[in-house]
């Protein structure tokens, strides 16, 4: 086994026995939600995955090890430790070698999952091409990771603060399949619609598993997006969210907020502008993604 990996007994036993495992990220805990909602969400997501037949593997970096699965103390550390580093592919080796605590983004979580042999990952939304990205060249490493690492990512689309059209174009260029799970339209995180289509629609975990297994058996490297819209009862109106996002973006620009600080600022400001309802939507879509990811992981083991 990779000497940098440290697994919980639950994850190690599941992998040894050929049982389904679902990866989870830690950035959503450390940077995506306030305390204590973040720790409550993290615990419930793990329980949802177990209830649907898979083992949860929350991934992060601590004490010079890539933690594949976290115990209660580890989850609490990521939820409540100030100034946890945000880790993408470029940061991975430094945070690990320096012994720092690092919360893994989508790209870094995919790396850790692939090292451990985990094929399915549930998150909220992927990163992508930022608005005005044609000038800033601000393109998330999540997109290039999806092109090279064999992990399927179940998400509610791309974060709605992004340029969704350009994000989908970039994924097409990189050869990453974008699957609409029970939908013909790419969701936009808080809303079920975006105005953009998906590459193809699949309606069951078994269909998704068959596509993934075929892709990887063919030697076509890279992951896939399984775009899973937030349940209708928790969705936000797309036009309302677009107005809120534009206001938050204008405020970020006025305050010269850039780089890794952009997304946490925007998510926090959007929560304030929606009176907290955006956070409720965020939590519910993560729960829904966890359930679907577990079902796909179970189906993959049958292929």
Image: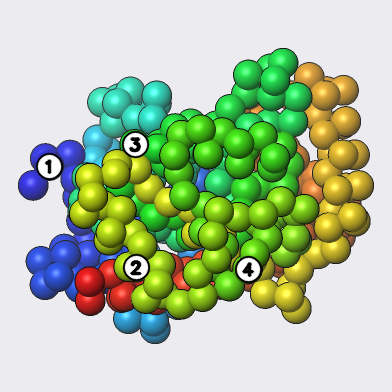
Image depth: mark 4 or mark 3 in front? 4
**Which mark identifies residue 2?**
1
Q: Which residue is at 39% across, 83% downward?
A: 51
- State left or right for residue 6 relative to residue 178: left
Which residue occupies the foreground of this view, 13 or 184? 184
| Residue occupied by mark 2 | 209
- State left or right for residue 297 relative to residue 197: left
- State left or right for residue 104 relative to residue 189: left
- State left or right for residue 229 relative to residue 13: right
Residue 71 in sight here: no
2 and 4 marks in contact (CB < 8 Å): no
Percent x, y for residue 192? 72, 64
Q: CA distance from mark 2 to mark 4?
A: 17 Å
| Mark 2 or 4, nearer chain start | 4
3 and 2 marks in contact (CB < 8 Å): no
Other residues around mark 3 within 10 Å, as few (<14) / some (14–19) / many (≥20): some
Other residues around mark 4 within 10 Å, as few (<14) / some (14–19) / many (≥20): some
**Which mark identifies residue 183?**
4
| Residue occupied by mark 3 | 148
Which residue occupies the foreground of this view, 254 or 166? 166
| Mark 2 or 1, nearer chain start | 1
Percent x, y for residue 126? 55, 46
Q: CA distance from mark 3 to mark 1?
A: 19 Å
Which element type, helix, strand or loop, lies under badge 4?
loop
Percent x, y for residue 59? 35, 51
Q: CA distance from mark 2 to mark 1?
A: 27 Å
């Amino acid at each position: 086994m990779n000497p940098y990996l440290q697994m919980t007994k639950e994850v190690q036993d599941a992998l040894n026995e050929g049982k389904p495992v679902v990866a989870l990220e830690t950035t959503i805990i450390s940077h995506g939600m306030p305390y204590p909602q973040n720790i409550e969400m993290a615990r419930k997501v793990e329980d949802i995955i177990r209830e649907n037949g898979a083992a949860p593997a929350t991934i992060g970096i601590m004490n010079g090890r890539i933690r594949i699965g976290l115990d209660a103390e580890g989850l609490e550390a990521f939820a409540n430790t100030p100034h946890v580093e945000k880790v993408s592919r470029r940061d991975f080796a430094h945070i690990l070698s320096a012994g720092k605590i690092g919360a893994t983004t989508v790209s870094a979580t995919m790396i850790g999952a692939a090292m451990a042999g985990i094929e399915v990952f549930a998150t909220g939304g992927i990163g992508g091409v930022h608005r005005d990205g044609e000038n800033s060249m601000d393109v998330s490493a999540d997109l290039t990771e999806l092109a090279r690492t064999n992990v399927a990512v179940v998400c509610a689309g791309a974060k709605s603060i992004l340029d969704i059209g350009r994000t989908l174009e970039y994924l097409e260029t990189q050869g990453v399949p974008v699957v609409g799970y029970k939908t013909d339209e790419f969701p936009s995180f808080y809303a079920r619609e975006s105005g953009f289509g998906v590459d193809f629609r699949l309606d069951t975990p078994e269909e998704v598993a068959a596509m993934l297994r075929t892709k990887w058996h063919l030697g076509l490297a890279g992951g896939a997006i399984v775009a899973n819209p937030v349940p209708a009862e928790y969705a936000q109106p797309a036009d309302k969210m677009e107005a809120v996002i534009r206001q938050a973006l204008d405020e970020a620009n006025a305050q010269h907020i850039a780089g890794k600080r952009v997304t946490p600022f925007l998510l926090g400001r959007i929560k304030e502008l929606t009176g907290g309802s955006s956070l409720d939507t965020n939590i519910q879509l993560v729960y829904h993604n966890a359930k679907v990811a577990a079902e796909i992981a179970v189906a993959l083991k049958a292929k």
